[in-house]
Amino acid sequence: MNAAEKQEVTSSPLVLTFYQDPGHGWVAAPHYLVKMLGIEGDISPFSYVDGNFVYLEEDCDLSIFLRAIEDKGITIQFDEEHSDEDSPIRNKRSFSVESLNAGNKLIDVKVFAELTVIDTDNQEKVIGGDFNWTVLSEKCAEEVESNLRDEVERVTKYGSLHNKKAVKAEVKQSFILVEPPGQGLSVHRYPLPEISINF
C-alpha cells in the first residue's frame, strides 16, 4: 500500500457495530478485515462467526483486533447497539479459522421446534420454541439436529425446563435468514429433512 492509498484508508473512519447485551459485547468485523489484519490465528472460540462477520468478544479478542487496526493506521468508530435480552450473536457459530474460511458456506437458520416433556406431576406437555443458529450449509440438517439436542439437554438440566424429562424434540419449520449488504433482513422458507429426536 503506497502513502496515497494509506491516506485514503485512514482519512475517514471505518464504522463498525458494537453489539451489547446485559452480559457481554461484540464488535462485528467483516471477514476480509480480519484476514487482512492477519489475526485469525489469534482469535479465541469465545468470539463468533457467520457468513459475513466475525463477532469479536470484548474482553480479549477485541484488544487483539484494536492493536492490529492501530498498527495499520486505520481509524475506526463504533455504532453501538444495546439489547436488554441475550443477543442473537450468542447463537452463532463459535469462531475457528475453519469457520472463517467457510465464509459464504455459513448460513443463519431460524428453527421452530416442539419439545415433548414429562413434568414433575408425570404429565406430558408440548412446548414450542424457536432457535437461531449459524451452520454450514452442506451440513445444515446434521448441525441443526446436533444443536437442538444440545439445547434440549441444556434447558432440561440447567434452564427453564429443569427437573422435566425430555421425551421428544421435533423441528416443525425452518427458515434461512439472509441480510444482503445494504439491505434489510429477509427470511426465506428453508425446508429441512424431517428432524425428530427421541430422548
Image (spheres, rainbow, N blue to C red):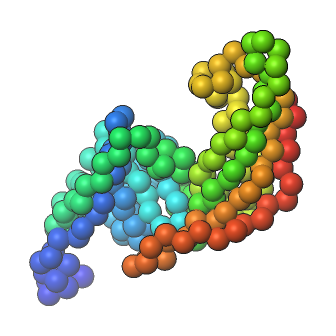
Residue 52 image position (x, y, % from top left) = 48, 67
Looking at the image, residue 138 sits to the left or right of residue 196; the answer is left
Q: Residue at x 70, y 29 (%)?
A: 153
The residue nearer to you, when weighing 36 against 158, is 158
Q: Residue at x 27, y 47 (%)?
A: 63
Looking at the image, residue 191 sits to the left or right of residue 130; the answer is right
Residue 10 image position (x, y, % from top left) = 15, 75
Q: Is residue 163 above or below residue 2?
A: above
Q: Is residue 125 above or below residue 41?
A: above
Q: Residue at x 71, y 59 (%)?
A: 174
Q: Which residue, as the protein is rendered here, is positioned at the far top?
A: 121
The residue nearer to you, when weighing 68 against 174, is 174
Residue 185 image position (x, y, % from top left) = 49, 69
Can you see residue 65?
no
Looking at the image, residue 94 sits to the left or right of residue 19; the answer is right
**Quadrant (top left/top right/bottom left/bottom right) for the N terminus:** bottom left
Residue 110 image position (x, y, % from top left) = 63, 56
Quarter of the image holding residue 152? top right
Q: Residue at x 44, y 66 (%)?
A: 31
Quarter of the image holding residue 11? bottom left
Can you see residue 89?
yes
How many numbered discs sit on the rendered protein? 0
The residue nearer to you, when weighing 93 against 114, is 114
**Quadrant (top left/top right/bottom left/bottom right) for the C terminus:** top right
